[in-house]
């Protein structure tokens, strides 16, 4: 995991051309202006772009990409830059293409159960616009107030509702996108059922800005559930929480939320937000469901009973929406709470089959102890998706090397258990060293052939996803 410096420049004539396409004020080149775009939410990665370009519409993006392909200028698409895998670090310099000016909610259609948004609309804006018409956009990443919908699509973001509702890919019906060569394509459309041709919508979903620039997204919506409820169970041991998760799902309950925090997370969150959590507990399991009042009541009763039967040291239910929101806040603020423990917070993102959850948690703890790193783990227990997080002070001797060595073992351990190196945060530059081990040579070669078909000059987010 290393920072890479820019290696190419953009000649003055090309800069003039960019200014002509998007307007002078939307081409940034000074150190101060481009600095925020040299990094994203991933620690330790940084590279300076030669220019930051902020287009206003699809036609401008097409013109920028046509120019970039002609001159071989690298282009890194970017939304809010909230990704956690160094996916927007412009390792080869060139242009960072920022989509945040294209941020309109174009349509919310209750009759068709869909919405159409521009790339740079935030997830929360889409959620709120749908909710205003009694509809639900289920994908719910913790970053939803800042992350863009196109960023979610490009990373196939998950979130707190994954178990019951799936992830971003389950809601993308159609895309407008611009190929690196400048052609504007439309994939899918407004249909829930459409199997004509290869599913390019799914291919672009999770493509991490390497195949095309997404400009407009059509998403499917659901009716907004009538009500929701949340409860919390505390366990002496994280393994018990893992067993409770397996039992809840085996019992046929499909909760909207099933999240966990280990003891270090509980204490960090309590220090951060003072929510009255049980600081002595080895693990906290947050369980929740939505639907009709009767359904929610029954579902929460069953989950509470299962946690008690597994030996929870305490089980409580939120009495109202305010209490429910406070419990969900405990989960949502895990990352900022942990970030206060030390200057560097390395958050990872492995997923294992659900029955292996408890074993993976034990393995992470053993690895952390062996490498003498401070590691806290939280995650989407219902999806088997864990976020082991190592915090350290970069001035503390070889702390960074120990953290990297620990994560290397964590990734291999996850794969050995039938899991993966990333469940929702993507590969980016951060996970690149492990992609080959996860996919194998044949699949990597196929990925590269797909990349070439979309991007013959190799300009779009070069170096990412094995390209
Ligand atoms: C506090 C916090 C909580 C988070 N919680 C979650 C979570 O619960 N679940 C989760 O999955 N992630 C989570 N994330 C990670 C992150 O928010 C997601 O990956 C999100 O989808 C990134 O959106 P963005 O707009 O910031 O995209 P960026 O970070 O700007 O870009 C991400 C990727 O998308 C590409 N991209 C962006 N826009 C386009 C476009 N228009 N066309 C083509 N490619 C594009 C970029 O090139 C890059 O590869 C969290 C991050 C933070 C900081």
Image: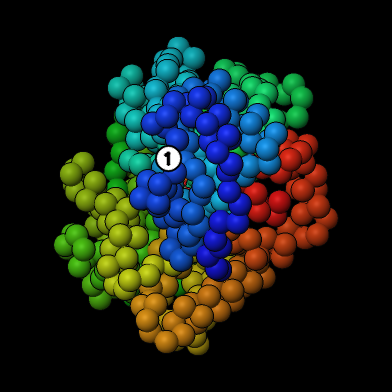
Using residue 95 as the reference point, say whether residue 452 is left or right of it: right
Using residue 33 as the reference point, say whether residue 213 is left or right of it: right
Q: Is residue 85 visible?
A: no
Question: Residue 334 appears at what percent x and percent y?
Answer: 32, 60
Q: How is the image coloured?
A: rainbow
Question: Residue 112 appears at what percent x and percent y?
Answer: 49, 14
In the displayed structure, would residue 179 be above or below residue 461? Answer: above
Question: Residue 324 appears at what percent x and percent y?
Answer: 24, 47
Tell me the SS state at disc 1: strand
Image quadrant holding the N terminus, namely bottom right
**Residue at image location 59% in from the left, 25% down from the top:** 63
Residue 244, image quadrant? bottom left
In the displayed structure, would residue 8 be above or below residue 14? Answer: below
**Residue at image location 42% in from the left, 29% down from the top:** 24
Question: Residue 265 appears at what percent x and percent y?
Answer: 32, 68
Using residue 307 as the reference point, say whether residue 246 is left or right of it: right
**Residue at image location 75% in from the left, 48% down from the top:** 447
**Residue at image location 65% in from the left, 66% down from the top:** 433
Please give the residue where the numbered disc 1 appears in the rendered image.
28
Which residue, as the protein is rendered here, is positioned at the far front? Answer: 12
In the displayed structure, would residue 430 be above or below residue 151? Answer: below
Q: Nearer the viewer, residue 420 or 58?
A: 58
């Amino acid at each position: 995991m290393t920072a890479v410096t820019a290696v190419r420049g953009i000649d003055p004539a090309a800069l003039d051309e960019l200014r002509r396409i998007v307007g002078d004020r939307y081409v940034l080149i000074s150190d101060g202006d481009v600095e925020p775009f040299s990094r994203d939410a991933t620690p330790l990665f940084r590279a300076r772009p030669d220019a930051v370009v902020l287009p206003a519409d699809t036609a401008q993006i097409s013109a920028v990409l046509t120019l970039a392909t002609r001159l071989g200028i690298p282009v890194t698409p970017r939304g809010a830059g909230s990704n956690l895998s160094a996916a927007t670090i412009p390792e080869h310099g060139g242009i960072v293409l920022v989509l945040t000016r294209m941020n309109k909610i174009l349509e919310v259609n209750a009759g068709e159960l869909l919405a159409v948004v521009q790339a740079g609309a935030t997830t929360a804006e889409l959620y709120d616009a749908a909710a205003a018409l009694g509809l639900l956009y289920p994908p719910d990443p913790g970053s939803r107030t800042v992350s863009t919908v196109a960023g979610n699509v490009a990373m196939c973001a998950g979130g707190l509702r994954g178990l019951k509702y799936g992830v971003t890919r389950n809601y993308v019906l159609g895309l407008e996108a611009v190929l690196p060569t400048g052609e504007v394509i439309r994939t899918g459309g407004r249909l829930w059922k459409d199997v004509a041709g290869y599913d390019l919508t799914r291919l672009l979903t999770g493509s991490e800005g390497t195949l095309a620039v997404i400009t407009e997204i059509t998403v499917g919506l659901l009716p907004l559930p009538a009500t929701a409820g949340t409860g919390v169970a505390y366990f002496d041991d994280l393994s018990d929480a893992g067993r409770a998760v397996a039992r809840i799902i085996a019992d046929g309950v499909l909760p909207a939320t099933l999240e966990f925090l280990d003891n270090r997370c509980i204490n960090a969150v309590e220090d951060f937000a003072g929510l009255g959590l049980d600081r002595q507990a080895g693990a906290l399991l947050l369980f929740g469901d939505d639907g009709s009042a009767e359904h929610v009541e029954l579902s929460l009763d069953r989950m509470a009973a299962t946690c008690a039967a597994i030996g929870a040291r305490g089980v409580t239910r939120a009495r109202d929406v305010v209490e429910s929101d406070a419990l969900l806040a405990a989960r949502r603020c895990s990352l900022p709470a942990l970030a206060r423990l030390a200057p560097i917070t390395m958050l990872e993102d492995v997923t294992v089959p659900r029955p292996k959850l408890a074993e993976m948690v034990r393995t992470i703890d053993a690895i952390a102890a062996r490498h003498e790193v401070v590691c806290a783990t939280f995650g989407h227990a219902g999806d088997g998706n864990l976020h082991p997080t190592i915090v350290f002070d970069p001035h503390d001797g070889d702390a960074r090397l120990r953290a990297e060595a620990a994560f290397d073992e964590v990734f291999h351990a996850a794969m050995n258990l039938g899991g993966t190196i990333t469940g929702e945060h993507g590969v980016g530059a951060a996970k690149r060293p492990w992609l080959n081990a996860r996919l194998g040579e044949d699949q990597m070669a196929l990925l590269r052939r797909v990349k070439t078909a979309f991007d013959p000059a190799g300009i779009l987010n070069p170096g990412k996803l094995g390209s």
